[in-house]
Image (cartoon, rainbow, N blue to C red):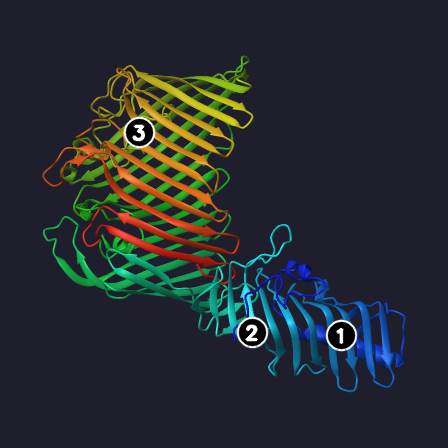
Amino acid sequence: MLPRPIRATSPALRGSQPRERWAHGGPGRAVLAGYVVAVSLFLAAQAKAQDLPGSAPPTAAAVTGSGPIAFEAGEVTYGLNSEVVTASGNVVLRRAGPGGEPGQSVRADRIAWNRKTGVVEATGNVRLLDEDGNQVFTDRVELTDELKAGAMENLLIALRDGGRLAAVSGKRDAQGRIVLQRAAYSGCPVEDANGCARQPTWQVNASRVTYDPAKRQIHFTGARLRIFGVTLMPLPGLTIASDGRPINGLLIPDLQVTANNGIQISDTWYQRLGNNQDLAVTGYLFTQALPMVSARYRALLDEGAFQITGYATRSRRTSVSGGPSNSSVTDFRGYFAASGKFQFSPEWSLSTSLRVASDRTFLRRYDINRDDRLRTTAELERIGETSYFSLSGWATQTMRVGDRQGLVPVAFPVVDWRKRLADPLLGGRVELQLNSLAITRTAGQDTQRAFARVQWDTTRVLPGGQLVSLTALARGDVYHSDANALTATALYRGNPGWQGRGIAIGALDVKWPLVGSAFGGTQVFTPRFQLVASPQVRNLAVPNEDSRAIDLEDSNLFALNRFPGYDRVEDGVRFTYGFDWQLNRPNWRVRSTLGQSYRLSNQRTVVPTGTGLADRLSDVVGRTEVRFKDLVKLTWRYRLDKDSLAVRRNEIDATVGSSRTYAEIGYLRLNRNITTVEDLQDREELRAAARIAFARNWSVFGSGVINLTKAPATATTPAADGFQPIRTRAGIAYADDCIELALTWRRDYIATGDAGRGNTVQIYFALRNLGFR
């Protein structure tokens, strides 16, 4: 017969102090032996020392092999005929742990020791506490002085992680394990913030529970999970750790229904291999595909940590790599990922990441991730007080439809060294840099690059409050490349063979912060002016590998070089002007930036038209941020055409609401009208998400990504109508302080090979203290 649900009024909670019992929710290991030994030893010492009844409360401690014992009681009596020693009146027994650490204690209304039978009995609001802070509450506990058998009635064990285990009765077996009958366990509080009784959201009912203090494990027999008062599923072989550590065993299964694989059921076996390593093996069963297995190994070492993850299965796949054949074949498929971070000393560290998939649709079909590229990296770093060194490399596996893997670069080695001189030069700071890069493609252009740079910076504050910065930079580059004609975009090729160039940049930057009151708050208005001059640079003579995605925006408006990376450098003379404005008032903060630049020379051959930098006068760029408390967060980035003020870049990110009820929207529109450069295509996208909370713990949520780009039809792709949903999802969830439940529906609208479009339904739940998820 299973126990009744845990309630604040159940027999396990009744007594003169039921609220105190649930309030002491620390760790629970139910180690009763130490408590009863302490009681019996003390009472034996008292009885043998006096052998006479006494009424005065003792105030000393008995010293045994297990340590000194401090004893307090309102009254102690001894029956000559019955030979029963009785302590009553808020009896408290304490024993300090080794080295002054917290020890053990027992509290009861009455403790009696029968010298004839050797039985020690504690009754009335008994609370047992061990050196780890574990607690047991019971109405009565009875043990022999040899601890070979024992019994408890109406008991409650408060576990360290906040869980509570209540039972009608319990006893200790010959192995020292505590066996509970008709027990119920829950990680949920049974009182609200006001101390009123509340029904636990979930609990596990079991006909028998065995607690092993030596192994610190609790094993359930005949266990069933009960959520919201409804018994849902059996939990055969359920075992949990009483001290919160992970233990070996099966986790709660996961259930999904997908368009690609049908009904999916997965379950994980967790294996703890040591205090610093573990292994999780997951099996997947599908109604429309062959089974799959995955494993994850994690380890924590003295120098760092790493983890390894792998998936493996066999299934039918369709090639989307752009090769000559798009036929479907049944083959081995899988994914391997490994990452680690190691700190060998305060200065030296190593970071690694390896990711590779058998094909381009495996990750999407099995809903592992939706990355469009997998990058493998390794970096050895040394960070000193005035220096920096990095040796790194990376390779990328493309997941994009139609991309040629042979055109994807492999970068190794990438060397970067920087040094800041300790002594200032002409009142400024000097930084040195050496950098080299080697890029290899199996079916494309190869490039090697090396350069040396020296940069001098100084900043002064003038008497009028102006902040003036001066910068001087000199750099020498050496390039070598071959197979340049295999690069499709002519602007990126450069000349084959060995090429060299020199770069010199000088810059003057002036800021003038003006502070004053406005609109009930404080404002800071900072006009800014920058002058940058550089001789002509041989940009087109060298390849462009890392300076392709150029676009004028607020983040690079006042940069020495608006190109990303090192391969392209703006030359000539240009003026940049603009301002920063900030307003702070109670609960409000507004920031805004606006600016534009003018160049004395025209660089149409270097900067593509449509980026905002091709003409002498640039487009106008800006950013505005508005924040009200934690309820409203708005960021607007924009670029306006210098002639027509048409919006060429419009990016909005907004969040309105609290952490429980909110709406998010993200919008991006790039209207550059660039058709000759594949890295700078136009795009329009809308992202939206919302969550609405109701009934205290319930919420509904939804999100969507929509492609709004309008594009003409080509030989390989149909015309885009400007509204193409990519992915949407919706669901309902429940969450409180001990459980999370969610039912989620998702629809994918884009088919990629065997990763087809369709609906996915997932059921998710996590229970506090049971280690699920």
Looking at the image, is mark 1 or mark 3 earlier in the sequence? 1
Label 2: element kind: strand
- Give me the C-alpha separation between circle 2 and circle 1: 28 Å
Is there a contact, CB below 8 Å, between mark 2 and mark 3? no
Q: In the rendered image, which residue does mark 2 sit on?
A: 182
**Mark identifier at residue 241:** none
Residue drawn where x is 58% and y is 67% of the image: 165
Residue drawn where x is 29% and y is 17% of the image: 645
Q: In the rendered image, which residue does mark 1 sit on?
A: 39
Closer to us: 704 or 594: 704
Q: In the rendered image, which residue does mark 3 sit on?
A: 563
- x and y percentages locating residue 697 in the rendered image: 49, 49
Is there a contact, CB below 8 Å, between mark 1 and mark 3? no
Quarter-of-image position of residue 722:
top left
Q: Looking at numbered disc 2 in the image, what kind of residue is underneath it?
A: Arg
- x and y percentages locating residue 518 in the rendered image: 53, 16
Residue drawn where x is 54% and y is 60% of the image: 187
In this picture, residue 147 sits left or right of residue 639: right
Q: Can residue 66 be seen in the rendering of this structure?
A: no
Looking at the image, is mark 2 or mark 1 earlier in the sequence? 1
Q: Nearer the viewer, mark 2 or mark 3?
A: 2
Quarter-of-image position of residue 451:
top left
- Give me the C-alpha separation between circle 1 and circle 3: 79 Å
Q: Nearer the viewer, mark 1 or mark 3?
A: 1
Closer to us: 266 or 574: 266
Label 3: element kind: loop
Q: Looking at numbered disc 1 in the image, what kind of residue is underneath it?
A: Val
- x and y percentages locating residue 253 in the rendered image: 38, 64
Q: Looking at numbered disc 3 in the image, what kind of residue is underneath it?
A: Phe
